[in-house]
Image (cartoon, coloured by chain):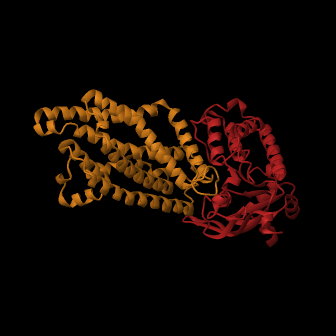
Chain colours: A red, B orange
């Protein structure tokens, strides 16, 4: 495989804050068109890893390359080909959904903006609140708007942080289906951070489990289930989080 | 400048997108629009009536017609220019949208230019009605200053941007805990730049400080124009030279603080 086969390549990535080490020398490579789950408890280093991929945080050492650009130094070469969604980052409350999406479409250099927004409104069922102030939406509606913003520029690399948080089960399932179709149709590379193990099991062909800034395990969901002798990814996650694998190995 | 290509140069298209966004924000709230006019109008009326009063008692002030009103209007260009810049920037912090912008193709220089444009827009919304009120109440025509007004305006707005850029960098690095600086930092310039009195009033050591600040030259220039009817181009050139230094220092500090924020992960936590 050549380098162009990988959309994201992290090499011995380290991030040390004054409060401690958030990411402690992780390496991974995500092939183009793959969908990978990033799992880990609170403080495992998932958000910092995603922030380094987006160029929002500068690594202390190591390198991160996205679509062959070194982040954050060469970020303007690739930021228009990427996007992200997180419930922890919001959009201006007083602007309507349409105004917010229009501004972001312009920032990302999207062509035929009105048509693209119409397309996303139909796909994500935003039509009824497109002209409502973003601050007046329910949590679930805001999540759908954030997803629309993340898909505006048809990104080749899509980073998702809890993409179905606050959604009812039916809408969440529908969003997962949409993301799956998007990835296949656009051959997009998706990195998904989630605490919803069923979601990760359904969507991801590979799972990276982080703990205290390190990669504890990295494999396909099926291989992880077999290795830990568990039936669900949630049980595997708990094993890793509570260090059961090490405990059993020691016994 | 490129139109839309995210990879090259500065994009007018992205700057326009940000200006459009701030315009949407501004027009979505009539109390905010009213606030832009309200305080400058109150200030101007208060100083205007004071000037009328002292002019009755003192022949100097009778000759120096309009210096107080002129000073308050020019001070508002400086103060409101910086506030217009900083408030637009703070909108991003209040709405937790900064990370969205920083992870988009928007470049820091485009962000700053959009904030500069918005500071002028907000300033014009506030100053045009107030300057018309000054004509109506006191017969003071700011526009009668002609080309001198353009020189005063250019120098004051440059200083306001330099301070606004620096404060925005501090807020990016330190979060909303530094927000109060946006509202108060300019007041240190009020006594030091001699808005309402000549530099000669200050103690000698403070005069050195005053002459290191670009607005001092503008306010001295305004008094020369209104009292002695002389346009001091030399003062404007000195102010402009100092402004280049201030603006460059503000922009460099902003970039340093932004890079520091990327190193410290401050862009992830834009709260207190």
The image quadrant that residue B18 belongs to is: top right
Front one among A245 and B177: B177
Identify whether A242 is placed above or below B184: below
Expressed as whole percent of the image width and height from the top left, the position of residue B229 reads 20, 43
Compared to residue B220, the image places residue A218 above or below, namely: below
Residue B93 horizontal side relative to residue B164, left or right: right
Q: Is residue A223 left or right of residue B261?
A: right
Whole-percent x, y for residue A205 in the image: 84, 57
Residue beneath the point at 74% across and 57% down? A39
Above or below, B259 against B133 in this view is below
Is residue A213 found left or right of B144 in the rendered image?
Answer: right
Q: Position of residue A133 (x, y in %)?
A: 61, 33
Q: Position of residue B3 (x, y in %)?
A: 61, 49
Report which quarter residue B123 is drawn in.
top left
**Looking at the image, which residue is at 30% across and 52% down?**
B236
- In which quarter of the view is residue A129 placed? top right
User: Does residue A251 appear in this view?
Assistant: no
Q: Can residue B105 be spotted in the picture? A: yes
Name the residue: 45% across, 39% down.
Answer: B121
Q: How many marks?
A: 0
* Left or right: residue A226 compared with residue A67: right
Nearest the viewer among B219 and B99 is B219
Position above or below: A72 against A197: below
């Amino acid at each position: 495989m050549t380098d162009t086969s990988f959309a994201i390549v992290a090499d011995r990535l380290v991030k040390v804050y004054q409060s401690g080490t958030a990411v402690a020398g992780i390496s991974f490579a995500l092939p183009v068109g793959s969908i990978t789950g990033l799992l880990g408890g609170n403080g495992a280093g998932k958000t910092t890893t995603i922030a380094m991929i987006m160029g929002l945080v500068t690594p202390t050492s190591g390198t991160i390359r996205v679509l062959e650009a070194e982040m954050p130094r060469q970020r303007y070469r690739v930021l228009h080909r990427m996007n992200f969604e997180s419930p922890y980052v919001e959009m201006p409350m007083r602007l309507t959904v349409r105004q917010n999406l229009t501004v972001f479409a312009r920032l990302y250099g999207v062509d035929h903006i009105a048509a693209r927004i119409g397309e996303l409104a139909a796909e994500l069922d935003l039509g009824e609140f497109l002209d409502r102030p973003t601050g007046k939406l329910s949590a679930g509606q805001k999540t759908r708007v954030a997803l629309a913003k993340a898909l505006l520029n048809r990104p080749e690399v899509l980073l998702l942080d809890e993409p179905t948080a606050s959604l009812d089960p039916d809408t969440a399932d529908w969003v997962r289906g949409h993301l799956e179709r998007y990835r296949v149709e656009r051959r997009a590379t998706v990195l998904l951070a989630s605490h919803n193990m069923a979601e990760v099991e359904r969507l991801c062909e590979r799972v990276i489990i982080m703990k205290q800034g390190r990669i504890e395990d990295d494999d396909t969901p099926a291989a992880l289930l077999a290795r830990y002798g568990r039936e669900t990814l949630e049980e595997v996650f708990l094993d890793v989080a509570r260090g059961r694998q090490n405990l059993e190995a020691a016994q | 400048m490129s139109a839309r290509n995210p990879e090259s140069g500065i994009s007018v298209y992205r700057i326009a997108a940000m200006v459009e966004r701030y315009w949407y924000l501004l027009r979505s709230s009539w109390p905010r629009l009213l606030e832009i006019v309200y305080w400058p109008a109150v200030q101007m009326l208060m100083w205007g009536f004071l000037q009328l009063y002292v002019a009755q008692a003192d022949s100097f002030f009778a000759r120096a017609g309009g210096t107080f009103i002129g000073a308050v209007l020019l001070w508002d260009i400086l103060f409101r220019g910086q506030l217009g810049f900083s408030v637009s920037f703070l909108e991003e912090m209040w709405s937790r949208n900064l990370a969205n912008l920083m992870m988009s193709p928007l470049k820091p220089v485009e962000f700053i230019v959009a904030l500069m444009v918005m500071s002028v827009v907000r300033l014009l919304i506030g100053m045009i009605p107030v300057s018309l009120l000054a004509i109506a109440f006191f017969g003071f025509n700011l526009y009668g200053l002609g080309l001198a007004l353009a020189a005063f305006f250019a120098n004051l707005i440059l200083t306001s941007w330099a301070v606004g850029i620096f404060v925005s960098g501090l807020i990016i690095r330190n979060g909303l805990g530094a927000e109060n600086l946006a509202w108060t930092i300019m007041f240190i310039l009020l006594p030091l730049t001699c808005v309402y009195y000549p530099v000669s009033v200050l103690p000698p050591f403070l005069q050195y400080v005053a002459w290191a600040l670009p607005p001092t030259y503008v306010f001295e220039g305004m008094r020369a124009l209104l009292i002695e009817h002389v346009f001091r181009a030399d003062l404007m050139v000195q102010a402009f030279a100092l402004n280049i230094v201030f603006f460059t220092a503000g922009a460099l500090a902003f970039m340093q603080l932004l890079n520091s924020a990327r190193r410290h992960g401050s862009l992830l936590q834009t709260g207190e």
